[in-house]
Image: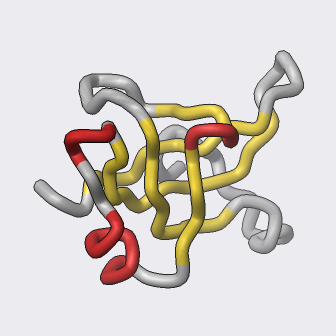
Amino acid sequence: MKGGVYLDAEAPSLVKAHFALVRATRGKRKRFPDNVVEPVASAEEALAREDAAQNLHAAEVMGPSRSSEGIHLYYLVRWLSE
């Protein structure tokens, strides 16, 4: 298990790690709907585009994963700017 997501060794392309920008208030929340997550090419790009004043934070996430309600979610692995 990584970041709250059980990984399937036989299907590694379904859920994978991404660097991303997450538009949310930082707190204890560990999962985010896909409409607030923007995957980017690298950690450097995420950090360069981060804007805390606009609640846009650089992170490493796992996903997308489908919730039981049918929503696509990304799970926080770590914030990059800690």
Tell which residue pokes out farthest to the left in this image: 82
Which image quadrant is residue 47 in?
bottom left
Task: Determine the residue located farthest toward the top in the rendered image.
Answer: 69
Q: Name above or below for residue 57 compared with residue 14.
A: above
At which x and y percent is residue 10? 84, 70
* Quadrant into which the C terminus falls: bottom left
Q: Residue furthest front?
A: 54
The quarter holding residue 32 reads top right
The residue lying at 51 percent from left, 32 percent from top is 31
Q: How many numbered discs, if any?
A: 0
Side (left or right) of 25 relative to 68: left
- Judge whether 71 appears above or below 59 on screen: above
Side of 9 relative to 30 (left or right): right
Residue under the point 47% across and 68% down: 19
Whether 43 is drawn above or below 78: the answer is: below
Quarter of image, res 38: bottom right
35 left or right of 38 in image? right
Report the coloring of the rendering. Answer: secondary structure
Q: Position of residue 45 (x, y in %)?
A: 38, 79
Place of residue 79 in the rendered image (x, y in percent of width and height, measured from the top left)? 27, 53
Residue 1 vs residue 82, the one in the foreground: 82
- Tell me if 35 is positioned left or right of 42 in this view: right
Q: Look at 45% across and 40% down and name the residue there.
A: 23
